Amino acid sequence: MLFSMTPTLVIVPGLGESGPEHWQTLWTTKYGAARVRQDDPEAPTPQGWAGRLQEVIEATPGALILAGHSAGVLTIVHWARLYGGHERVRGALLVSPTDSEQANMAELAPAILTMAPVPTQPLPFPALVVASENDPYVSFERAQELADAWEAEFVTAGEVGHINVASGHGEWPEGEVLLAECVNAWTPPGIARMTYPLN
């Protein structure tokens, strides 16, 4: 559960806005998260999608932690580039960062090409990149390079595809453990922390 003093989770979906069975949607309900909803979830642009994220951040009070998946990760890093971050954003969980510069992206997901180039400036807040070792939308090596460029921590999720419903990740308990660890690391002492029943 999320206690009232714990930072509010802001869900930043990728293409298609993450369906009803996706872990991002389940987290939205489970943790009372704020959620970024784009005007056209199939047509990302850096300025448009980052601008909507900024609107949600401004409308959501208190400390915030962002949780992006796929093109949602690109939204977060473009937002950081365009807006310089925000003093209330405590950190970001960046899951399966799609590489909009990948050579075969025109065949895999042409809509993502509009998010190129991927920003490589250090992020102005702590972040954790979670990458799969066999994600078709980003090589494991590229994910590591991006994490290094963003000055983010990096963990492997193993060979688990794109960490979405198609790869068997509706419920994603391992992700919830990582989220709890991030909240604990990024929340000042004396603030109520996130806890989970892990059974």
Image (tube, rainbow, N blue to C red):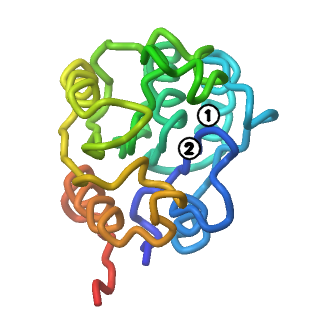
x then y, percent, for residue 176: 35, 67
Depth-wise, is mark 2 or mark 1 nearer the camera? Answer: 2
Q: Confirm whether residue 5 shows in the render.
A: yes
Rendered position, 130 above or below 168: above
- Residue at image position (45%, 64%) is 169
For label 2, the crowd category at 10 Å Cα-Cα, with few meaning under 14, some 14 to 19 and many 20 or more, is: many
- Residue at image position (51%, 12%) is 116
Which residue position is annotated with label 2?
A: 12
Q: Amino acid at mark 1?
A: Leu
Camera-side residue of 36 and 156: 156
Is 52 displayed left or right of 160 in the figure? right
Rendered position, 67 above or below 27: above
Is 172 displayed left or right of 122 in the figure? right
x then y, percent, for residue 23: 51, 63
Numbered disc 2: secondary structure: strand
Camera-side residue of 107 and 137: 107
- Residue at image position (46%, 34%) is 73
Q: CA distance from mark 2 to mark 1?
A: 8 Å
Hey, which quadrant is residue 142 in on the image?
Answer: top left
Hey, which quadrant is residue 1 in on the image?
Answer: bottom left
Q: Residue furthest bottom?
A: 199
Q: Residue furthest right?
A: 39
Which residue position is annotated with label 1?
A: 53
Q: Are marks 2 and 1 in contact (CB under 8 Å)?
A: yes
Q: Confirm whether residue 130 shows in the render.
A: no
Q: Amino acid at mark 2?
A: Val
x then y, percent, for residue 166: 53, 58
